[in-house]
């Protein structure tokens, strides 16, 4: 079980919202990442995610993404990610659960179960689903329920090995996933900075970025298998 956050994609050039110079500097999250923002100004919201989508399409998987693909040679690897990009999939990972949605998809405003894969960076006002309703970004906005959380809890509960990387562990409910890891499982956190939560007993802390620490750990696990 590998739990990834924005830090792993930042090494591919996708800035996190909270980075200095990131997209939070230009936009107030209340104006682009809430259901209320969509109701007030859908065109602004669409423009924001179109810009993010262009950024994602230009990015390429890095050594951390590729290391997880190599890990599948000997392990059943399940990835749970807070990221909305598709870099894990483009690297070749087979089992990826997105908690906060997927930037390369759109969903019907009338029926969220109607999801379309986008072929380019633009989603425009007037683009509709097959039933005639406006499409919106397939993103879990602030204030919305995270539909995949229950499945994520189940996956973590059954993990023999848990690896956490690229996340500050301060966004809930996702950060609470660690509490579901079995006591007997091997647990690793890879982060160059001190994480915001006190690391629970049983975690091995690797103070490196994902691009260096994850390939090293994956190779170590492959050699021990």
Image (cartoon, helix red, strand yellow):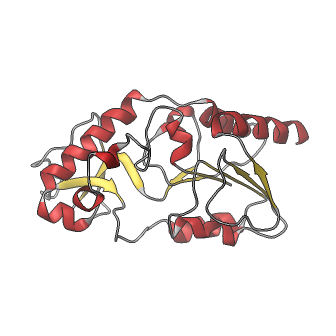
| Observer-nearest of 124 and 174 | 174
Q: How many marks?
A: 0
- The location of residue 13, given as percent across then percent down, is 46, 32
Classify residue 93 as left or right of residue 145: right
> In which quadrant is the N terminus drawn?
bottom right
Point 43% across, 43% down: residue: 85
Residue, x 38% and y 42% (percent of image)?
A: 22
Query: Which quarter of the figure is the C terminus placed in?
Result: top right
Q: Residue furthest right?
A: 224
- In the image, residue 23 lies at what x, y percent? 33, 44
Q: Quadrant of residue 88?
A: top right
83 versus 149 height, above or below: above
Who's the residue at 58% across and 61% down the image? 169
Location of residue 121 in the rendering, given as x and y in whole percent from the top left corner: 27, 35
Taking the spot 47% from the left edge, 49% from the top edge, the residue there is 83
Residue 186 vs 48, above or below: the answer is: below
Q: Name the foreground residue: 131 vs 122.
A: 122
Q: Is residue 38 left or right of residue 53?
A: left
Given the current orientation, which residue lies at the most extreme left position?
Answer: 126
Instruction: In the rendered view, tell whether residue 83 sits above or below residue 159.
Output: above
Query: Is residue 222 toward the left or the right of residue 114 in the image?
Result: right
Residue 54, how many percent across, how many down? 31, 33
């Amino acid at each position: 079980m590998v739990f990834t956050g924005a830090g792993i994609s930042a090494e591919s050039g996708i800035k996190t919202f909270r980075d200095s110079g990131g997209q939070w500097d230009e936009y107030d999250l209340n104006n682009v990442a809430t259901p209320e923002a969509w109701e007030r100004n859908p065109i602004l919201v669409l423009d924001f995610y179109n810009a993010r989508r262009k950024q994602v399409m230009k990015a390429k998987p890095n050594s951390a993404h590729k290391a997880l693909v190599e890990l599948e040679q000997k392990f059943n690897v399940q990835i749970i990610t807070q990221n909305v990009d598709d870099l894990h999939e483009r690297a070749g990972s087979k089992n990826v659960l997105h908690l906060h949605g997927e930037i390369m998809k759109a969903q019907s405003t009338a029926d969220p179960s109607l999801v379309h894969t986008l072929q380019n960076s633009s989603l425009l006002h007037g683009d509709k689903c097959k039933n005639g309703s406006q499409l919106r970004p397939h993103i879990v906005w602030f204030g919305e329920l995270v539909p995949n959380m229950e499945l994520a809890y189940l996956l973590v509960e059954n993990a023999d090995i848990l690896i956490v990387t690229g996340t500050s562990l301060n966004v809930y409910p996702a950060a609470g996933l660690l509490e579901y890891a079995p006591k007997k499982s091997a647990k690793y956190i890879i982060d160059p900075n001190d994480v915001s939560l006190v690391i629970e007993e049983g975690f091995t802390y690797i103070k490196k970025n994902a691009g260096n620490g994850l390939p090293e750990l994956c190779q170590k696990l492959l050699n021990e298998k």
